[in-house]
């Protein structure tokens, strides 16, 4: 590495440290902390696991899963099925049987 590369690396690391500090502690970048809960957040917190009122009850102690699978429903089901089909396609395309490997080694 040259001196120039090291200087660029140090400058980049310092920038990342200052940016992380600004986001985390100083509140310079992003939204300042809110003192009140938004109505949508209140809705999800009240109805995520609510034994008294089961009208919108998700029955899931994990909020993200409840929102994705219960409240968004079919949209997420289709997105997930496309994701799994893409994984299966990749496995099928790159799968080599033992015979294929032997043929490759013979060439």
Image (cartoon, helix red, strand yellow):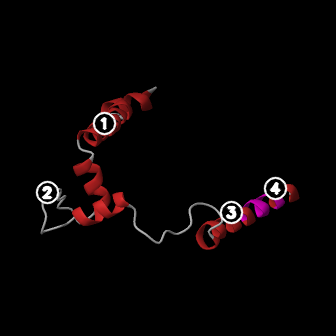
Question: Is residue 98 part of the magenta span, yes or no?
Answer: no
Front residue (pair 30, 92): 30
Q: Nearer the viewer, mark 2 or mark 1?
A: 2
Q: Which residue is mark 3?
A: 16
Tag 3 secondary structure: helix
Q: Which residue is mark 4?
A: 5
Calculate the distance from the C-alpha at mark 4 to the C-alpha at mark 1: 42 Å
Question: If you read the primary sequence from the N terminus, does the residue marked by circle 2 or circle 3 appear first?
Answer: 3
Question: Is residue 12 part of the magenta span, yes or no?
Answer: yes
Q: Which residue is mark 2?
A: 55
Q: Which residues are magenta?
A: 7-13
Tag 1 secondary structure: helix
Question: If you read the primary sequence from the N terminus, does the residue marked by circle 3 or circle 1 appear first?
Answer: 3
Q: Residue at x 68, y 68 (%)?
A: 17
Label drawn at residue 41? none
> In which quadrant is the N terminus drawn?
bottom right
Query: What secondary structure is the stretch in magenta mostly built from?
Result: helix
Question: If you read the primary sequence from the N terminus, does the residue marked by circle 2 or circle 1 appear first?
Answer: 2
């Amino acid at each position: 590495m040259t001196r120039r590369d090291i200087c660029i690396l140090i400058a980049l690391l310092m920038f990342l440290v200052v940016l992380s500090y600004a986001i985390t502690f100083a509140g310079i970048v992003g939204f300042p902390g809110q003192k009140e809960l938004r109505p949508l957040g209140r809705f999800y917190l009240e109805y995520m696991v609510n034994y008294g009122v089961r009208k919108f009850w998700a029955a899931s102690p994990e909020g993200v899963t409840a929102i994705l699978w219960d409240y968004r429903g079919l949209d997420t089901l289709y997105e997930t099925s496309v994701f799994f089909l893409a994984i299966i396609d990749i496995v099928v395309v790159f799968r080599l049987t033992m015979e294929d490997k032997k043929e490759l080694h013979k060439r």
